[in-house]
Amino acid sequence: MLKSLTISLFLTIVIELTASLVLGIRNKEDIYVVILVNICTNPIVVFIANCLILIGSNKLIYNIIVIIMEIIVVFVEYIMYKKHLKNYKKSPLLLSLINNSVAYLIGIIINF
């Protein structure tokens, strides 16, 4: 499970940081915020998802719980971005939504 957590965190940071750069994050402090926010949120979601797999949850329950967690993460990251981004003038909610959507979709493609 540790390998899964590490790989997922690394890929999520790379994907969301790339998306953030495309969306206009340029300041070094704001780049650190994007990285730290993902360090705070990604391992929790991946750990819970892995636990659901280990206990043998059916696909429907697994997918519903993962989608609910992703929605929660969008709002948690939005709050963190709103509070800590200093030089990003666009919507922190849109940043969080796009970053997480891109990472989630790429994750689906990788796991497919």
Image (cartoon, grey):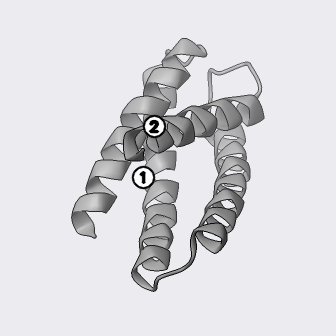
Q: Is residue 8 above or below residue 105?
A: below
Q: Nearer the viewer, mark 1 or mark 2?
A: 2
Q: Residue at x 50, y 73 (%)?
A: 48
Q: Residue at x 45, y 86 (%)?
A: 55
Residue 5 locus on image (x, y percent): 32, 60
Q: Residue at x 42, y 71 (%)?
A: 50
Closer to us: 79 or 67: 67
Residue named by callout 2: 109
Residue named by callout 1: 39
Residue 57 locus on image (x, y percent): 54, 80
Residue 77 locus on image (x, y percent): 64, 47
> Where, quadrant-wise, is the N terminus in this rendering?
bottom left
Relative horizontal placement of residue 2, taking residue 68 as reference (left or right): left
Local packing at callout 2 (Cα closer than 10 Å; few below 14, some 14-19, many 20+) is few
Tag 1: residue type? Answer: Ile
Tag 2: residue type? Answer: Ile
- Decide if residue 98 is in sight here: yes
